[in-house]
Amino acid sequence: MSAAVITGTGLFTPPHSISNEELVDAFNRWVDAYNEQHADAITRGEVTAKEHSSAAFIEKASGIKSRFVMDREGILDIERMAPRLPKRGNDELAILAEMGVAAAKDALDRAGRSASDVDAVIVAASNMQRAYPAVAIEVQNALGIDGFGFDMNVACSSATFGLQTAAAMVEAGRARSVLTVNPEICSAHLDFRDRDSHFIFGDVATAALVERADTVREGRSWSIEGLKLSTRFSNNIRNNYGFLNRCEAGIDGNEGPAAITDVDTDLLFKQEGRRVFKDVVPMVAALIRSHLDEVGVRAEDVKRMWLHQANLAMNRLIGTKVLGREPTPEESPTILDRYANTSSAGSVICFHLHADDLAVGDLGVLCSFGAGYSAGSVILRRAS
């Protein structure tokens, strides 16, 4: 059995960005239009008036200041308030695959590898574009990789579950190297007319190359010291959109998630934020602590935690429970302010941007958590 290492990570950042102020301006204009349209019903007490949002409220509630998106015009258009992502022909590269390919190429370049060195592709993401053919097979084909590919979805923990699967295949000798890809178009599933959640998500794609330790060339690498996964069913974070909903709600399948109307908002992202906070923080902290114990690592020896980027307060509290004190910004870096919540990709972005300064031998924990509930912990040591 060969040990598994991560030799390269990749990042694709969309070309468009929306600040809190821009998002709030569009939201508040929609609120004003809604309240005016329903003024009589509001006066009679039949309809509840919508409330304005604010940039200060968003930053205080989440730590988010802006987000990258694949389309900003559709989101800021108060007549639409959803990304405008035109349907592509079946002979064109799908938008999710296009994002994934860009991140994958970055990871391969950083690892000093080519498509011929890769045996498998796993696309692990929370927001899949279609049921089949697998987006992973499309990415595999676009990159020219022999072997196989498949998709998997464990919501915001998809990336760590993908790394677990990739490492297991490499360690068992089933593959020399596996490319995990996490393309997320979260904006297509977000209700931009919901004050409590309209600011949460952004779009992005990440990738990581997992290889056999005994085949690593010169360059940076991270040995995977341990992986631990956990799931527990909860409805507190839910997204009901799926191919069966076209029959149930009469949605035009050619338009996709962006065509969902006010009546159909149950098909978009929903969460009970306070319940999620209360449930997930102790669950994740306990997972990390138990995982460190199993691997024989003391919490005080962890130099960095690359946590899922969902909420700044959650990350601070998780870090405090793990370390026994509040972590410094260097110990628990954040990219939440610039990227917002990018679902499965968030912890990988954090690792991609905040790992190179650690020394050989330093230990870190990459951790995801989200709907399901699901959580994944990956203990990494800088190997070279």
Image (cartoon, rainbow, N blue to C red):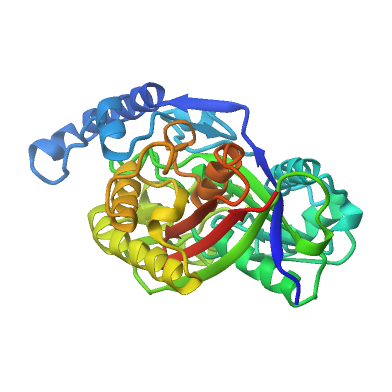
Residue 187, x across and y down, in percent: 50, 42
Residue occupying image coordinates x 34% and y 67%? 286
Locate residue 174: give its quadrant.
bottom right
Residue 70 versus residue 116 in the image, above or below: above
Image quadrant occupied by the N terminus: bottom right
Q: Is residue 310 left or right of residue 141?
A: left
Residue 91, x across and y down, in percent: 84, 49
Q: Is residue 335 visible?
A: yes
Residue 87, x across and y down, in percent: 69, 44
Residue occupying image coordinates x 85% and y 48%? 113
Closer-to-camera residue (20/73): 20
Locate residue 330: give its quadrant.
top left
Closer-to-camera residue (331/335): 331
**Direction left: furthest residue:** 44
Residue 271 versus residue 304 in the image, above or below: below
Closer-to-camera residue (252/167): 167
Residue occupying image coordinates x 74% and y 47%? 104
Residue 303 versus residue 153 in the image, above or below: above
Q: Is residue 307 visible?
A: no
Q: How many marks?
A: 0
Residue 268, x across and y down, in percent: 43, 53
Residue occupying image coordinates x 83% and y 60%? 215
